[in-house]
Structures are given as C-alpha cells and as structure tokens.
Image: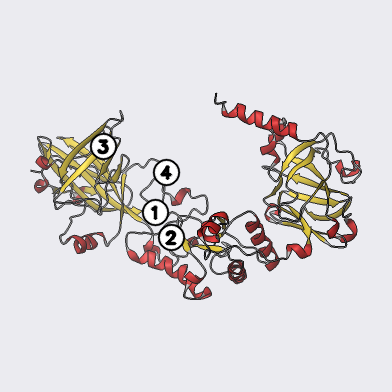
C-alpha cells in the first residue's frame, strides 16, 4: 500500500532520528569538500546567555541539545526535529560539532568555510574565537564566511569542538551554506578543473563534462579574487558545471570595478574548465537593459492599440475611447448576422473629448474606437520581481538593435569580438511583446509599431488596412479560448499572429468552450483583413462576407 506523503515524511524523520546517536560523538573528518556537513547539536538562546554559560567551551556538555541537519535554515528543520515553534523563531541560536581532524594536519593552519549565515555569526574552535561576521556588516547574509584556524588551536588526532553562535534578525535563520568545510589552507588553494567533453562516452557518462552539468545563475560575482576563487571551488564541489553570469547590476554596464571583477571572473572560471552562459539583462524581461535602451530614445517604448467596441441598433451611441491617441474609429453594418465591410463608415470626426457620440442610422452596427498608447500597466514588465521599468517595443527592429548595442556589443568590446570564446550561449530572459497581461485589461490590446503596415505589404505583397473590421465578432463568453492554425486567442484579447494567419486561404479554428467541449470548423479569411493580429470582430465563416 502506498503511504500518504505526510506519513512517509514522518516515518523517514523518525527513522533518521533513530539512527542518530543520543550524544553526538566525535567523528573523524575526511580531506574533502563538505566534510563537516550533516548532523550538528543545536539549541536556541532567546536570552543570548550562551557565551556566559560556556556554550563555546570544548568541555561543555551538549548531550541534551537537539540534532539538526546542516546546512539549511532552522525553520525548514522544525518538523523533522519535532520542534514546530522553531519554524517562527528569530533570535540567537547555537550550533556545536565534535570532530577528529586527521593527524596529517598537524602544524597546519586550517580554513573553516560556512558559506552564507543568516544573519550574523561568531565562530569558536576549541573555545577560541576564530571569526565573526556581525553588527555593522551590511547585508551580512550575502558574505561568504571563511575563517582561519591557527595551527595552535587544533588538536590533530583528538576531539575538537566547533561552536557557532548565530543571530537571526528575521526571516530564515541558520547556517545556510551551501558548502561547509574544514581543510588545511594549502589544500583549499589546490586547483580543481572540471573534466571536458573530449573523452569516450562511458567516461563522460560516469563523470559528465562541464557543458553537460547544471549551471548556477550568479548575477553578481565577488569583487575580490580570493572571494571569486572560493565561489568557483564551492560551485565545482557541489557538482555544478559552471555559471550563467553577467556584469553586476550595480551601476549597470558602467561600473569599472564591477567590469574588472567580471572579466577576471570569466578568465578564472574558464581556467577551471567551467561552462559559461552570458545573462544579457539587468533583471527581466530582456530588452530594457536596466533602462539603458530607452535612455535618449523614448520613442522605443512598447506601444499598442487599445480597442473599444459596441454592437448597436438605432439610437445614440456614446462609446468612451480607450486611453491614448485616436488611431481609428469605424462602424460596420451588420445584416442578417453578416458584416458588410464595403459599407463601413469612418467615425473619427465623431470622437471628441474622449468619447465617440454617434446617431446611428437604421440597422445594426458594430462600432470600434481604436487608440494608440504605450504598453506598461498590467504587463509582464510592470510586475517584474527585478526592476519595474518601461519596456521596449519589439515590433520594429530599431529598439532591439539598440538593446544589442548597449549590452552584447559592450561585452564584445570588453572581452573581445568572439564572445563564443567565453560563452556557450546567451540567456535572454523572457523578452515580451507586452501582450500577456497579469491583470484584467479594460480594453482589448494589440501590440503595435509604425512598421507593421509596410512590413506586412513587403512580406505579403498586398496592403492590409489596419483594423478593418470586416468580419464577424468573436464571442469570448461562448468561447473561452481558441486556436487558429496553432496560435492562441486569449479571451481577454483574442488574436492570432501574422505568421499563423492565412488571408485568402482556408483556416481552421479549434475552440475550447467553457464546458471544455471541443469544436472545430474551417473558415476562409478575407484577403484584406485589416490588422497584424485578429481582434474580436475579425473572424468569419466564408459565407459571412457579403
């Protein structure tokens, strides 16, 4: 019988606890990375009285302390430790580890690596304070901990005690790692180089080359060479094949200190045989370059057509125009359920003070007011977890060319014209036409650029009158979503791309309704369809064009 996930987790935790000794006896450590990871003794110290009570002394009896797996935040260990209150604990806590160091390390200075500690720490070895990263250190959690243990403090071949006081100011707390080690300083400095691809398949399968391993995203390389080297060795010891990296975001693309660190880091990483990808942006989506692409070029900002429409039959129509500059207002007669594009009336002169007011002639009409405006509110760029910046327009080529100029070209100027010498590939982070909205839009929106009409004519050989609503309106309530020859029509903004849409030819719609039923029908598009994408009011069966 398959046990529920929660029960399996509890049984696993109980089994682990049963295997752990009641008292953490000293264990001999090996000369390898990660040699002090695993179960440590742990207790919280809400009164911060541990130093006075002797928690750092090697002879202190810690047998009543709980066992905790290190590295990792103590909040994540709360259930396995049977201490649910630990999941919300902020404050001081202590870690202790008893270990035996090899006799061959006698008379050698050791290096203690803890990785990241959240937030502050004070480290003791056999009762002697060997390092501290504490108050006054800005964003201390980001600083890798590396402390030197003098040879005089260590007792090779005997029991040694490592004690760490951690102070967490809020959020996750603990020894975060990801790599913990205690090694002679001369061993830490040994060069590690990843295996490469020029080997038989069996060897590559058993020990994958750098370019076949997981790469870690590192947005900010340390400024100092020593810190960089420790980072690289840490990544390699964890099995990573390299990094996806970039010049640091601080004063993006203009900070000489960060450029020097980046160039040095790339060279050092390649020496180690690491596989590198270039992250080409400052956050996401790729294109803004931290605001550099639009600097001096406001005309490159993403733009779109906002579409408001209404079906009317007699009387006076008042239709509020969407925000932006008037692009087109038109009314199309509907007779017996069919749209007569030849009878369309230009209503642009009836739009005043932000609204269309029109006395409708007899009959049924489908009326459209279309405006052009920048695209930002509610888009991918506006909700980015990196930097919330206006985005560039990917419809015309010039903004993209400018982005390449301020990013890729600058990397090539700094590193040499052949970026392939340094990087396997480019990580371009979620570029967007700004047509996917993270909140409901008041109007239908179509990405737009001044080049759409001319580009369409060049590619297709005929003009496409923009937004000519010659076809039957699509009903989003009856059809929650649709696909036209593979391109999705979102019910908030139904449309299909030029590449998918085939004017003058048979097209097939597959639509999934609200009841999840699937319908399929063929239709023929009028060759003069009037938009770079189909909006509501732009779909028809062959017989519906009068």
Identify the disc placed on residue 324. Answer: none
Secondary element at tag 4? loop
Query: What x and y, as percent, mark residue 452?
Result: 26, 59
Which quadrant holds the C terminus? top left
In this view, the mark in front (1 or 4) = 1
Q: Residue at x 63, y 65 (%)?
A: 193
Q: Which comes before the other along the chain, label 3 or label 1?
A: 1
Residue 450, above or below 27: below
In the image, 184 versus 403, the foreground residue is 184
Secondary element at tag 1? loop
Q: Which comes before the other along the chain, label 2 or label 3?
A: 2
Residue 305, above or below 439: below
Query: What x and y, as percent, mark residue 423?
Result: 50, 66
Q: CA distance from mark 2 to mark 1?
A: 9 Å
Identify the disc placed on residue 438. Answer: 4
Q: Which residue is mark 2?
A: 287
**Circles 2 and 1: CB distance less than 8 Å?**
yes
In this view, the mark in front (3 or 1) = 3
Which quadrant holds the N terminus? top right
In the image, 339 versus 161, the foreground residue is 161
Residue 219, above or below 338: below
**Res 537 seen here:** no
Residue 196, above or below 501: below
User: Going by the picture, which residue comes out furthest to the left?
Assistant: 546
In the image, 111 versus 469, the foreground residue is 111
Secondary element at tag 2? loop
Query: What x and y, as percent, mark residue 502?
Result: 19, 51
**Dot 4 alpha-carbon crowd within 10 angstroms: few under 14, some 14 to 19, many 20 or more:** few
Q: Which residue is mark 3?
A: 511
Secondary element at tag 3? strand
Q: Is residue 138 left or right of residue 439?
A: right
């Amino acid at each position: 019988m398959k046990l529920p996930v929660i029960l399996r987790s509890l049984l696993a935790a109980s089994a682990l606890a049963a295997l752990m000794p009641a008292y953490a006896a000293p264990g001999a450590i090996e000369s390898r990375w990660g040699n002090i990871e695993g179960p440590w003794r742990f207790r919280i110290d809400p009164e911060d009285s541990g130093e006075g009570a002797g928690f750092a002394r090697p002879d202190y009896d810690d047998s009543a302390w709980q066992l905790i797996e290190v590295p990792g935040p103590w909040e994540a260990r709360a259930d396995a430790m049977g201490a649910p209150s630990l999941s919300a604990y902020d404050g001081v806590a202590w870690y202790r580890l008893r270990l035996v160091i090899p006799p061959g390390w006698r008379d050698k200075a050791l290096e203690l690596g803890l990785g990241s500690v959240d937030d502050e720490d004070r480290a003791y070895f056999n009762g002697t304070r060997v390092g501290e990263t504490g108050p006054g250190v800005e964003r201390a959690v980001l600083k890798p901990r590396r402390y030197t243990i003098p040879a005089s403090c260590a007792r090779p071949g005997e029991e040694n005690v490592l004690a760490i006081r951690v102070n967490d100011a809020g959020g996750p707390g603990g020894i975060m790692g990801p790599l913990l080690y205690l090694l002679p300083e001369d061993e830490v400095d040994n060069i590690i180089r990843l295996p490469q691809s020029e080997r038989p398949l069996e060897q590559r399968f058993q020990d994958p080359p750098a370019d076949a391993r997981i790469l870690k995203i590192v947005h900010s390389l340390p400024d100092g060479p020593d810190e960089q080297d420790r980072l690289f060795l840490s990544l390699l010891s964890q099995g990573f094949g390299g990094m996806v990296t970039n010049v640091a975001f601080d004063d993006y693309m203009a900070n000489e200190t960060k450029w020097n660190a980046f160039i040095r880091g790339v060279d050092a990483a390649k020496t180690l045989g690491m596989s590198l990808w270039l992250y080409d942006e400052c956050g996401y989506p790729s294109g803004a370059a931290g605001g550099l692409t639009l600097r001096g070029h406001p005309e490159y900002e993403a733009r779109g057509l906002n579409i408001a429409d209404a079906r009317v039959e007699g009387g006076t129509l008042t239709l509020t125009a969407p925000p932006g500059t008037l692009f087109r207002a038109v009314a199309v007669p509907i007779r017996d359920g069919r749209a007569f594009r030849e009878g369309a009336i230009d209503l642009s002169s009836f739009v005043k003070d932000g609204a269309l007011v029109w006395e409708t002639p007899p009959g049924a009409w489908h009326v459209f007011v279309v405006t052009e405006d920048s695209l930002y509110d509610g888009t991918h760029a506006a909700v980015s977890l990196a930097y919330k910046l206006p985005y560039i327009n990917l419809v015309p080529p010039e903004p993209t060319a400018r982005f390449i100029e301020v990013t890729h070209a600058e990397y090539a100027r700094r590193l040499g014209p052949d970026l392939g010498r340094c990087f396997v590939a480019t990580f371009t982070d979620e570029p967007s036409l700004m047509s996917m909205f993270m909140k409901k839009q008041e109007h239908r929106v179509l990405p737009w650029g001044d080049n759409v009409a001319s580009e369409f004519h060049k590619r297709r050989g005929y003009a496409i009158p923009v937004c000519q609503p010659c076809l039957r309106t699509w009903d989003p309530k009856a059809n929650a979503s649709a696909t036209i020859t593979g391109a999705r029509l979102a019910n908030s903004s139904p449309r299909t791309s030029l590449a998918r849409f085939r004017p003058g030819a048979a097209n097939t719609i597959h639509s999934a309704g609200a009841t999840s039923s699937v319908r399929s029908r063929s239709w023929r598009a009028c060759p003069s369809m009037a938009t770079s994408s189909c909006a509501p009011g732009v779909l028809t069966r062959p017989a519906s064009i009068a």
